[in-house]
Amino acid sequence: MKLQADIESPVRIARRGLMLVISSPSGAGKSTIARSLLEQDTRFSLSVSVTTRTRRPSEIDGVHYHFITRDEFFRLRDGDALLEWAEVHGNLYGTPREAAEKAMRDGRDMLFDIDWQGALQLQEKAKADIVSIFILPPSMEELKSRLLRRAEDSSETIAMRLRNAKVEIERWRDYEYVVINDDLDRAFSAVLSIVNAERLRRDRRPGLFDFTSVLLEQASADIGKLDSR
C-alpha cells in the first residue's frame, strides 16, 4: 500500500494534533491498516496500549502492546493513569494517559487501535480531538476465514471472537466514518482520504489566525501603496 500525495500545502500552519481511532471486529483489518499508516505517515505516533492478554508469537512487548499483569493494570486504572480502558474477550486493555497527552500538546497525531468501549470513552473525554473510523468486513464468512488464516489463536478463541463480532458490529453507528474492507488497498486509501480531510479542518488549525492576519496586513499595505500613487 502506497501513501497518496499529501494534499496539504508546503506552507506550514500550526495545528493541534488529532486522535485517530480505528476500531473493528477482530480480523476485519484495523491493525493492518493502522500499521501501514504508521509506516507511511511519520506524523502519526501509535498509542501503545497496556493489556493483560498473553503475548502472541508475532508480537513484541512495548511495540504492539505493553503486556502487564492484572494487578499492574488495576494499579494504573485506580491511579488515573489510563485515558480509557475496557475488557475485551476476557482481557483488559487501556491507553496510558501521559504519552497521549504529551503528543497532543506537541501537535502530533495519535493513532488508537482500540475497541468500541475505549472509543466511546475517548469521545466523551476529548470529542473535539477525535476522528473515529470503524472497519467492517465484507462478510462474516470472510471474517472467519481471516481469523483462521492468522493461525495465532485456538479454536475456542476464534469462536469467542466471532461471537463478539456481532456485538462489535452493532456499534458501527457510534463512529463518524465507516470503511468496508473488501480490498485492503482500497480501504487504506479511504482511511488516508479521511485523515487528509480532517487535518485541513479550520478548527484543528489555530495557526490560521496568525497566517490570515499576516495576509490581511500585507493586503492593507499593498492597497495603501496603490492608493498613494
Image: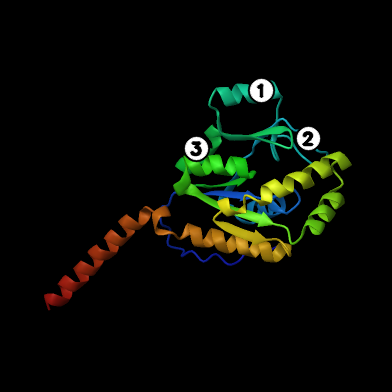
The amino acid type, in three-letter code, at marker 3 is Glu
The secondary structure type at the circle numbered 1 is helix
Mark before the other along the chain sequence, 2 or 1: 2
Q: Position of residue 62 (x, y in %)?
A: 69, 35
**On screen, residue 209 above or below 63:** below
Foreground pick, 134 / 206:
134
Foreground pick, 13 / 37:
37
Q: Position of residue 181 (x, y in %)?
A: 71, 61
Which dot marks residue 101? 3
Mark before the other along the chain sequence, 3 or 1: 1
Q: Is residue 131 left or right of residue 201?
A: right
Q: Which residue is mark 1?
A: 72
Q: Nearer the viewer, mark 3 or mark 1?
A: 1
Q: Is residue 76 left or right of residue 144?
A: left
- Between the C-alphas of marks 3 and 2, the distance is 26 Å
Q: Position of residue 54 (x, y in %)?
A: 78, 32
- Between the C-alphas of marks 3 and 1, the distance is 21 Å
Examine the rendering and report whether any part of residue 6 can be seen. yes
Foreground pick, 26 / 33:
26
The amino acid type, in three-letter code, at marker 1 is Glu
Q: Residue at x 33, y 59 (%)?
A: 211
Quadrant in which the N terminus is drawn: bottom right
**On screen, residue 221 above or below 154:** below
Q: Is residue 208 left or right of residue 51?
A: left
Which dot marks residue 43? none
Q: Residue at x 21, y 71 (%)?
A: 222
The amino acid type, in three-letter code, at marker 2 is Arg
Examine the rendering and report whether any part of residue 17 can be seen. no
Mark before the other along the chain sequence, 3 or 2: 2
The secondary structure type at the circle numbered 3 is helix
**On screen, residue 207 above or below 6:** above
Q: Which residue is mark 2?
A: 55
